[in-house]
Amino acid sequence: MNLPKRYIIAVVTVFTVTLFFGCESNFKEVQKINFSEFVPGSDADTVNIKYTDSGLITGVLKSPKMLDYSNLDFPFTEFPKGIDVTLYDKKQKRTFIVSNYAVSYKPTGIIDLQGKVKITSETGQILETEQLFFDQKNEWFYTERKFKLTDAKGISYGQGIDFSKDFKVINSQRVSGEIESDEKI
């Protein structure tokens, strides 16, 4: 039995096309199974949250938009339109924080502040930078980005700084500027 070449080519082509489209359909189904939507578990507009400890307010957070991703394996809360935070110490002295964007990572307790970050202490110290991290457990700020620090002694610029939330302990790297000092050389 000798089949014509055209017949064999037609059968092979039909078989190949059927196999190709059959596998594509299954592949799309597998993709759908492995796809998880990245959507917040909840969202809120015009947020005003008060944090307390033993009846005392420890912080007030205000934001025009909050997206809560606590439904993910690594939960976090996003503030895409920025935050305005007031932190209170045990003596009710305040530290003010403003940024254009923020993300709070629940498992690590780290808050990532981005975009025109400005921190002002009640005593008038001001730190400005483009990105700053806050370790909530240790009440410690840090960045490797360029910064501007203004206080009663003057203005300093640098790249890389870490400090306590009350500005009592400040460690800065690569600093320049004019600062008044009580130390004699």
Image: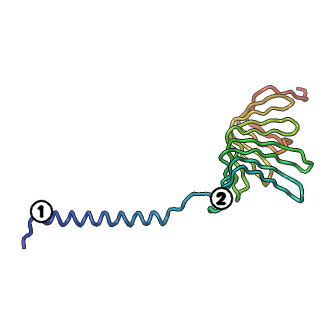
Return the disc, 1 or 2, that comes first in the chain's sequence.
1
Residue lying at 83% horizontally and 28% vertically, measured from the top left: 154
Q: Which mark is residue 110?
A: none
**Is 165 placed left or right of 74 in the picture?**
right
Residue 131 is situated, as x and y percent measured from the top left of the image, at 69, 41
Question: Furthest residue to the left?
Answer: 2
Front-lying residue, 138 or 37: 37
Residue lying at 38% horizontally and 67% vertically, measured from the top left: 26
Residue 24 is situated, as x and y percent measured from the top left of the image, at 36, 63
- Crowding at dot 2, Cα within 10 Å, few <14 / some 14-19 / many 20+, comes out as few
Residue lying at 7% horizontally and 70% vertically, measured from the top left: 2
Tell me the quarter of the picture where residue 82 sits. Answer: top right
Front-lying residue, 136 or 24: 24
Which of the image's four quarters has the C terminus? top right
Question: Furthest residue to the front?
Answer: 45
Residue 14 is situated, as x and y percent measured from the top left of the image, at 22, 65
Give the residue type at disc 2: Ser
Residue receiving disc 1: 6
Q: Which mark is residue 42?
A: 2
Give the residue type at disc 1: Arg
Which label sits in the foreground, 1 or 2?
Answer: 2
**Is 18 placed left or right of 70 in the picture?**
left
Residue 94 is situated, as x and y percent measured from the top left of the image, at 86, 44
